[in-house]
Amino acid sequence: MPDNRRAFLIQALVVVATLASGMGVWSEDRRPIRVAVIGGMTMTGMWDKLVAQFEADTGWKTQLVITGPKDVISEPFKRGEIDVLTMHSADKTTDLVADGYGVNLRPWARNEHTIVGPASDPAGIRGMKDGAAALKKIAEAHAPFVDFYGPGSRELTHKLWQRAGLKPEGDWVLKDESNTPQEIVAFAEKKQAYVVVGRIPVTNGKMALGKMEVLVQGDPEMRRPYVVIEANPQKFPQGNAAGARALADWLAGDAGQKFVLDYGKKETGGIPLFYPIRVPGEDPAN
């Protein structure tokens, strides 16, 4: 074989090998990002629209592996089957990081809680936008109030009682005897009592309102943050660390915050289901 042809073939082989190697690296780096998402985000349809925008912006693909309650979606994350986990901020999320399963925990969105009560509204709280002030009026009226056992609602309710400067005591404070969290509003209706619940399950029918009404909403202090956690690449080296960082950065960055803000503005009734952590363009450190 002439030297010039041999040299050409060698160069061609080098090019082909380089391209093949590059394609292999690209396909490995661009594996779909496996995600676990709290149920409220998927039941409203927001997550599907959000990841469609993320994929269009970045070229990454995502795979929804599991959605549901936090106790359910945290387990595959602990097994290394998830690259990104998003759910409400709570002790469980902090433990996932403290125990080495996740890294880089960041808040990126909030949802809202409301006070639901009977149409007769014996405490006269209808239309109020200050949850602590509303609870104070309920206490002053000794109107029946259910201490909902749901962890998120209970944590937030206790914070409101602290803001009101009150410790709820007396026979007007009712123990939660509902069979499931989804039945709490029906239980409160039976007792003609007030209760603090998330706006999402009420809006989507997961908690049937019956003849009860949403009486207090729109208080920023009644919003719970969602956090995003990346799988720890040292514990799970087989995971998609680059993809996890890309999605988490997008959620907490201007693009994700703008999406949450715009999505919230489109909600019916003028009250969003989700809120951004900050106004897009603001310095996160401020």
Image (cartoon, rainbow, N blue to C red):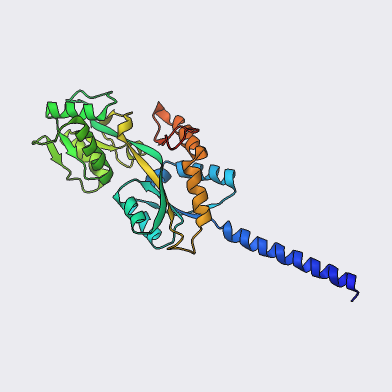
The picture quadrant where one finds residue 193 is top left
Position above or below: 274 against 247: above
Depicted 65 relative to depicted 191: above or below: below
Instruction: Please indicate whether residue 237 sits to the left or right of residue 173 in the image.
Output: right
Q: Position of residue 25 (x, y in %)?
A: 62, 61
The C terminus, quarter of image? top left
Looking at this view, name the residue that lies furthest to the bottom: 1
Coordinates of residue 246 in the picture (x, y in percent)? 52, 49
Measured from the top left, where is residue 175 in percent x and y? 14, 42
Q: Is residue 103 left or right of residue 126?
A: right
The residue lying toward the viewer, choosing from 31 and 248, is 248
> Quarter of the image holding residue 66?
bottom left
Visible residue check, residue 118: no
The N terminus - image quarter? bottom right
For residue 22, which quarter of the picture?
Answer: bottom right
Q: Position of residue 27 (x, y in %)?
A: 61, 60
Residue at the (20%, 23%) spot, across then down? 124
Question: What residue is shown at x 11% (from left), y 29% (from top)?
Answer: 142
Outermost residue on the front side: it is 285
Q: Is residue 176 visible?
A: yes
| Residue sitting at the far left | 171
Could you tell whether 177 is left or right of 242 in the image?
left
- Counting the numbered discs, the total is 0
Q: Residue reaching furthest right?
A: 2
